[in-house]
Amino acid sequence: MRIKKGDSVLVIAGDEKGKIGKVLKVFPDKNRAIVEGVNFIKRHTRQTRKAQKGGIIEKEASVNVSNLLVYCSKCSSPTRVSFKVLQPETGEKSSKVRICRKCGEII
């Protein structure tokens, strides 16, 4: 999966098309992600304790990952992600990083 927690993403399809938000949680087995400020649902809850209120609560629902594009902060545009293996200078392990396809910066 090319989208990780903490990424800025652009919604490219659905009712929330055009909105930019931060990924709060990713579900790789379901191919879905929860994005901050996108796809709100209303949840009817009952008061369970004295401290917790009941009523209608709005919260974010998950969005399919195919409807999201990573938003690159360097080139200020949505972009696809590619991977690159960085070769170590000394006896370290090589590391695989995600890069922006448009500007080549590490995401």
Image (cartoon, rainbow, N blue to C red):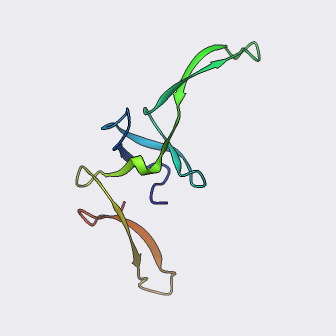
The quadrant holding residue 56 is top right
Left or right: 82 with respect to 91? left
> In the image, is residue 107 above or below residue 95?
above
Query: Hey, which quadrant is residue 85 in on the image?
Result: bottom left
Residue visible at 53% across and 27% down in the picture: 59
Relative to 40, 8 lies left or right: left
Tell me residue 75's x, y (percent).
Answer: 22, 54
Q: Quadrant of the C terminus?
A: bottom left
Q: Out of 44 and 48, give the one closest to the viewer.
A: 44
Q: Nearer the viewer, residue 34 or 97?
A: 34
Q: Residue furthest front?
A: 14
The answer to whether residue 80 is above or below residue 88 is above
Q: How many marks?
A: 0
Residue 13 % position (x, y) = 36, 41
Please state the horizontal and vertical placement of residue 77, each as a whole percent of the image: 25, 50
Residue 101 location, x and y as percent? 28, 64
48 horizontally vs 75: left or right: right
Residue sitting at the far right: 49
Q: Residue at x 51, y 45 (%)?
A: 33
Quadrant hosting residue 96: bottom left
The one nearer the camera, 52 or 88, is: 52
| Residue for point 43% across, 51% down | 66
Residue, far bottom: 91
